[in-house]
Amino acid sequence: MSSPLSRLMRMLMLALVLGLASARPAAAADEGPSILRDAETEALFRDIAAPLVDAANLDNKSVRVVLIRDDEINAFVAGSQNVYVNSGLMTSADNVNQLQAVIAHELGHVAGGHAIRMGEGAKEATGISLATMVLGAIAIAAGAPEAGMGIFAMGQRAALGQFLAFTRAQETSADLAGVKYLSAAGISGKGSLEFFKKLQNQEYRLAIYSTDSYERTHPLSGERISILENLYKKDPAWNRPSDPQLEARFQRVKAKLFGFVNSRQAIIKYPESDQTVPAHYARAYAYHLGAYPDKALSEAEALLKTNPHDPYFLELKGQILLESGRPAEAVTPLREATERSGRAPLIASMLGHALISTEDRKNYAEAKTILKTAVSVDNENPFAWYQLGVIYDQEGDTPRAALATAERNNLEGKPKLALASAEMAMRGIPAGSPDYLRAQDIAMVSRTELKKDKKGNRDRE
């Protein structure tokens, strides 16, 4: 049976761990918000991030900007070269310059390896906590329990303070790196200051009246503005306007996202008296999600009148038709959207879905070709793998249907189902073939994940 002292020490260590965990971005948790994928949005992210990635001496092929569904105004990195942008940040940003400033800051974290180095800060904090625990235990053993408890409490606070200081230093470093990257890319820092002022207003609304940032993971926005303002104003790019084409694309993406994540508010924010492209976009998604297909289709047609061959307007029309139960009519706009977008995998996958949904077997060969190409370019689309599995099943190719199912379950984080499907595929696919080796890889990864889960459950018990 544990002694009261050992139980107390374990409780204090748990408190320290929980304190450190609360300092991490919420979206970095294992069960974070869902990823939102859209061909037009991802193309915009690639184009606005590319000069900043180059400025940071990173590889554009390795860095991705990923949109996640979360109303919080936030962006973060989490142990990889991916930059995660919350939908709340996208819909709150006023212009593309503000979004570029956020991406520049997050690339500072990537280039600095801050997510990886987070363990260093935790290690230093844990060292302080352990040292004070020893001193506190000595004081208790010497007959001074109140003094010992006081030492424990001071150690806890000092450890947390050390960790918070570490994260604030990382934020300052990322701020300065962001200045450097924006300057190298010839992009104004006005958006950075504008966005920090937004955050400052949010701090006021949340009644954060601290005069300094001692107990915070980030410096206060006012502190950051005072440091960055002089640096940005001295830069030659300070008065340089944003690329008007990028700005127009940003406003489109922002509007369609707003219509998707907040359809009721979208109708208010973008009333029918507003006949701009972003407004049509927002209302089209809002009406579509609200089950008003005729109104949604009318908005899509209004967009196509402005540009009949825009791939994303065509994609929208095809999506509305497909998801309204009219797949045969969806094929033509989706086929053109696929071609005009350079065979963007997400759009191609929707075309494959439409072809299958016609239930016309003459369309299956085209669907199979399109879907196989799509997953070869973008292997992170579970729905495309599902559709490809449907085709294989219709053809009677059970082993490859099982492999497609294994791919889908692997992407969806279901190792038990992925393992079962991969093993089924391996029983019917010739050994040593590329498909067999892929099934073998999925089986191996799934077994490893299941072992980790099992070990984690034992540790929790």
Image (spheres, rainbow, N blue to C red):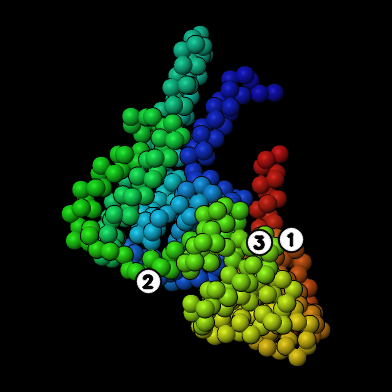
Question: Horizontally, is 233 left or right of 248 in the view?
Answer: left
In the rendered image, residue 449, in percent from the top left (x then y), is placed at: 66, 58
- Residue drawn at 67 percent across, 40 percent down: 460
Q: Earlier in the sequence, mark 2 or mark 3?
A: 2
Q: Residues within 10 Å of mark 3 (few under 14, many from 20)?
A: some
Question: Horizontally, is 73 left or right of 185 in the view?
Answer: right
Is 186 placed above or below 24 here? Answer: below
Q: Is residue 453 visible?
A: yes
Q: Residue furthest top?
A: 143
What is the count of numbered marks?
A: 3
Point out the frontmost of discs 1 and 2: 2
What kind of element bears circle 2?
Answer: helix
Report the residue marked by disc 2.
245
Report the residue marked by disc 3.
289
The answer to whether the residues at label 1 and label 3 have Cβ atoms under 8 Å apart is no
- Residue drawn at 68 percent across, 55 percent down: 451
